[in-house]
Amino acid sequence: MRTIGMLLVGLLLLCSVGSVRAEEPKEPREPKERTEKQLTPRERARLHNTMAKKLFNLGLFQEAAEEYEKAYQAKAAPAFLFNLAQCYKRISRKESIEKAVFYFKSFVNSVPETPMRVDIEKEIVKLERELAQLSRPAPFYKRWWFWTVVGVAVTGATVGTIIALQPEDMEPRDGSIGTFGIP
């Protein structure tokens, strides 16, 4: 009897331990990170916009522009066009300034009633003037070949003058070293 009682107690203990384990609260699983393709267009746009802002603040305008382009492709918000124009304006190359003008005009066309319209149009005029200056060829006296020709001409004239001004009796005299034409 005593053995049967011990077996019953043991069984009860096993059952209670098993049930305690089953009732332990499960730790919440962390959600899996979604890939960019699994994000909604709005979430993708927000992700690229955040990255673009960081890059812009670091002065990496080309990289920021690429992120703004991705954000615009995810969600065609006109604000991204304005931000693209700001990035390209700061790169200061002819092609970049052309892109800045394009994106400013695209923004104004997308949001014609924007309160910034007057300022943006002034900026477009300023950038177009800058483009006109960059498109003009430099005057001939600011080109490398002009100063090369001048250097060659001056060097030739100097050498010719030195040779022409030398005395004709340049023969060394006996007993003198390095003194030409002095008796």
Image (cartoon, grey):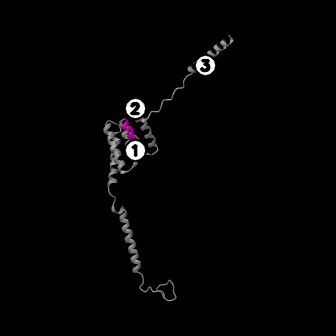
Q: Secondary structure at mark 2?
A: loop
Residue 60, horizontal then vertical, whole percent: 44, 45
> Which residue lies at the image location 37% right of the left edge and 63% below the top edge?
144
Circle 3/circle 1 CB separation < 8 Å: no
| Amino acid at the residue labelled 1 | Cys
The answer to which of marks 3 and 2 sits earlier in the sequence is: 3
Q: For this view, does 60 lie left or right of residue 112?
A: right
Q: Secondary structure at mark 3?
A: helix
Residue 144: mark: none
Three-letter amino acid code of the residue under disc 3: Val
Front residue of this view, candidates 71 and 131 = 71
Kindly indicate the quadrant of the structure image that contains residue 138. Answer: bottom left
| 97 shown above or below 142 | above
Give the magenta part as a residue range: 68-74
Residue 163 on image: x %, y %: 40, 79
Q: Amino acid at mark 2?
A: Thr
Measure the C-alpha gap from mark 2 to mark 1.
26 Å
- Work out how far the residue at label 3 is from the one at label 1, CA to CA, in angstroms: 65 Å
Residue 80 belongs to magenta span: no
Q: Categorize mark 2 by other alpha carbons within 10 Å: few (<14), some (14-19), many (20+).
A: few
Provide the residue designation for mark 3. 17
Q: Which mark is residue 87?
A: 1
Q: Which SS does the magenta portion mostly show?
A: helix
Residue 93, given in percent of the width and then of the height, sits at 38, 51
Return the residue nearer the eye: 40 or 136: 40
* For the residues bearing labels 2 and 1, Cβ distance under 8 angstroms: no
Mark number for residue 40? 2
Which element is circle 1 on?
helix
